[in-house]
Image (cartoon, rainbow, N blue to C red):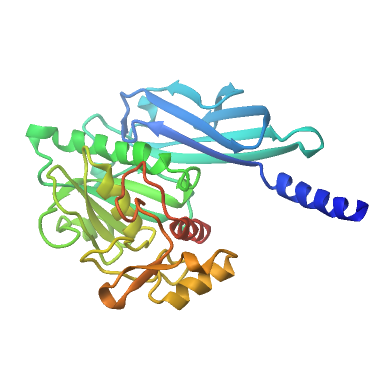
Amino acid sequence: MRREMTLLGLLAVAVLSTACSLDVQMQHEPIIATSDDEITFTAEARTSGFIQELQIEMFVNGAWVKSCDSTPCVFEGGPFPDLENDWLNYHTEVTAKLGQGWLESTYSDMDLGYTGITEDDYSWKEDEGASHIPARWGDWTWLNTNVLIQRSEDYDDGNGGLVAFLGDVGDKMIDVLMTKEEIFGNMNDINVYAYRKAGDHTTGCGGTLHADTLADTGAVIDDNAILHVEDIQDCTSGFNQFTAEGSTNTQAFLHEFSHSIFEQADEYDGPTFYFEAANEPNIFSTEDNCRDEQTAKYRDPDDCYQFTARQGGWWGTHTPPTVMTNGLVTHPWSPESIERLAWWFDNN
């Protein structure tokens, strides 16, 4: 009996010791800032486990600016006229003491970001030939995925034009992507630019980019998005170009972004193109593939079901609504989609 209790105790320790975690994210707003703007920097820590202590340190342009012992930690900075047409960098360093008693441990994490400070007419480095403004950058590495967001021509003077578009880019970053638990703290792998020129959202799947896009951006851009005002059925083309409504509807942006950048497939029964990603797919072309995945992950293979008979039939384990069925920011990703996201961030 004593031996059995010891084994159970060891198991309990193993479970409890892995139950605590710390994830950190720092952001700035407005996403596109001019040299006349004040900028709100927010550092946030998300933890699991009992919090004994929390210490957040915030830095802007390499200088310490604020400490907090609770989350979120907010600092109002700027304006930054000396950085006009230059880069602004920021980061946070967070330490947390989590757990209780002899299970107590100290965790640390950090997050960083970069953005361009533009002139008040948003002509970032235009005299140097630049046509796109750095919105939010992560790490300076060749592995990062570079996303260019441009407006469609229906962002005209009557609905705010370029200024409204740049505000919508910020909303998509802060209110959609960076709020999702699976993306929180992982934006270092994605660099986002806002393009000043306008494309066309009405022609073909994914719209038509401005004719100068490739010449202006070269091989730097991996994925392109066109935001528009009109309410239409949005689409992703070739895993590298999509359309989405800019001002109000978050549904298309999150869903199509997940297609184009994360290569996640639709999880609904409809006239779409189904595919099975090479690594950690969120849907499966055969029942055997689905069941093998469930078995390998120590889950019940009987959770697999055929959610559509289209294109020879496709299988999954998801329960709608999900991001890849409906796409609202309040909808969860399916368990298979979450594993796809984890794989993507680990390999980009």
Q: Let me know if residue 64 appears in the view.
A: yes
* Picture coordinates of residue 274, whole percent (x, y): 30, 69
Q: Above or below — where is 27 with respect to 269?
A: above
> In this rendering, does residue 123 appear at all?
no
Q: Residue at the front extreme?
A: 1
The residue shown at (28%, 73%) is 309
- Image x and y of residue 31, in percent: 34, 35
The residue that appears at 54% across and 65% down in the rendered structure is 300
Q: Is residue 237 left or right of residue 192?
A: left
Q: Position of residue 162 (x, y in %)?
A: 17, 37
Give whichever of 190, 228 is nearer the camera: 228
Decide: is 83 above or below 187. above
**Residue at x 82%, y 37% (from the top left corner):** 102
Residue 193 position within the rendered picture, expressed as x and y whole percent measured from the top left: 31, 47
In the visual, does 201 lie left or right of 191? left
User: Looking at this view, is 331 or 279 the one in front?
Assistant: 331
Return the residue nearer the eye: 223 or 6.
6
Q: Residue 169, located in which quarter of the rendered image?
A: top left
Q: Residue furthest left?
A: 158
Q: Is residue 27 above or below residue 177?
A: above
Tell me the residue at 38%/69% (across/down): 315
Q: Quadrant of residue 237?
A: bottom left
Q: Number of callouts in the render? A: 0
175 sits left or right of 144 in the view = left
Q: Nearer the viewer, residue 123 or 177?
A: 177
Looking at the image, which residue sits at the far right? Answer: 2
